Image (cartoon, coloured by chain):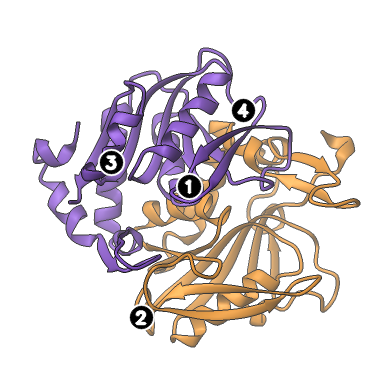
Amino acid sequence: MVEMFAAENGLKGDPRLQAISNAIRVVPHFPKQGIMFQDITTLLLDHKAFKHTVDIFVDRYKDMDISVVAGVEARGFMFGPPIALAIGAKFVPLRKPRKLPGEVIAEAYELEYGRDCLEMHVGAVEAGERAIVIDDLVATGGTLTAAIRLLERVGVEVVECGSVIGLREVKGQRRLNGKPLYILVEPREIDDC
Amino acid sequence: MSAYRDKDPRIHGIQSRIRVVPNFPKSGIMFQDITTLLLDPKAFKDTVDLFVERYRGKNISVVAGIEARGFIFGPAIALEIGAKFVPLRKPKKLPGKVISEEYELEYGRDCLEMHLGAVEPGDRALVVDDLIATGGTLCAAMKLLERVGADVVECACVIELPDLKGREQLNGKPLYVLVESH
């Protein structure tokens, strides 16, 4: 699994990355004690920084023959569609159980406590399509791995996963089925805000 | 107001890409599925373009989108017209301080939340969702925005179910839709 931070992969010193990072708010102890939640809603309030975020992903993927952008409910729905629209790809929402109305395939995955499940509509994607999966933040990679599995099960080639925020991987902790992961910024500390 | 009535040539393509799923989430409901629209890049782009053309240059500073399908259309519109995007969410999803608005469901009640500080007095706002049925959710969304002093300029939905008369629930606020389904 190759993890690439934008600043170390072609965008060193790009002022857009600092603007994006500055626009993210840290909310301590949400959803529970000890978690420093990276809140992207403040990024969405900063039109320039939000546009930079989308533009960076669009520039990266527009010439890679991507026909599918998959986004995980719900914050993946805010970043995935503008990227899909700009590169001329389909947008495929990956959802919690019982939200999608048609026939679905489901993939279960582990949470810290318990399990969850991601669903995709049958027929949304076709074998041989090239896809990216977009989310706001990658932590353990459990959700992204489930998303990759859903797409691969129907014969789609997942080219890369893209995330606005990501921690530096602790060796072996994040698998993503060996797929590359492209991350714009690292999480903010509370002192930076 | 609907583009359907205006007979914009893009409407037919948009309408034809919406899939009706019978008896979802329960018997008797003909569910309007927009996920098939999202699979057609041209029709999806046309959908967003129709809204962007209507709202560009009208000094809209906020596009509020209702979780979760409002999140699929709202941000793209906001980016094109230079507005903030504000997600309106189910309870306990937003991490910061919120204000809440309760609303009636067919059976029971639900609640919509918005971050404090996201919207300022005087902001000119749109509310975006994929569909308007009874208008209960849109009404709660408008109330949230108005409570913090925003001016809700219009509600914008891809689909309207006119038989459910949601339009009449919007306290006189205008509603713009692309297609109607009877």
Residue at disc 3, secondary structure: helix
User: Residue beneath label 2, please?
Assistant: A126
Mark 3 on the same chain as mark 1: yes
To which quarter of the image does residue A90 belong? bottom left
Question: Residue visible at 44% across and 24% down?
Answer: B125
Label 2 crowd (10 A; few <14 / some 14-19 / many >=20): some
Q: Which chain is purple?
A: B
Mark in the foreground, 3 or 1: 1
Q: Which chain is orange?
A: A
Residue at disc 2, secondary structure: loop
Residue B49: numbered disc: 3
User: Residue beneath label 1, please?
Assistant: B71
Q: Amino acid at mark 4?
A: Ala
Q: Chain of mark 4?
A: B
The CA span between labels 4 and 1 is: 16 Å
The CA span between labels 3 and 2 is: 27 Å
Question: Residue visible at 54% across and 15% down?
Answer: B149
Label 4 crowd (10 A; few <14 / some 14-19 / many >=20): some
User: Residue beneath label 4, please?
Assistant: B118
List x then y, in percent, for residue A44. Answer: 58, 37
Q: Earlier in the sequence, mark 3 or mark 1?
A: 3
Question: Residue visible at 32% across and 27% down?
Answer: B55
In the rendered image, the residue lying farthest to the top is B122
Q: Earlier in the sequence, mark 4 or mark 1?
A: 1
Q: In this orientation, does residue A16 appear?
A: no
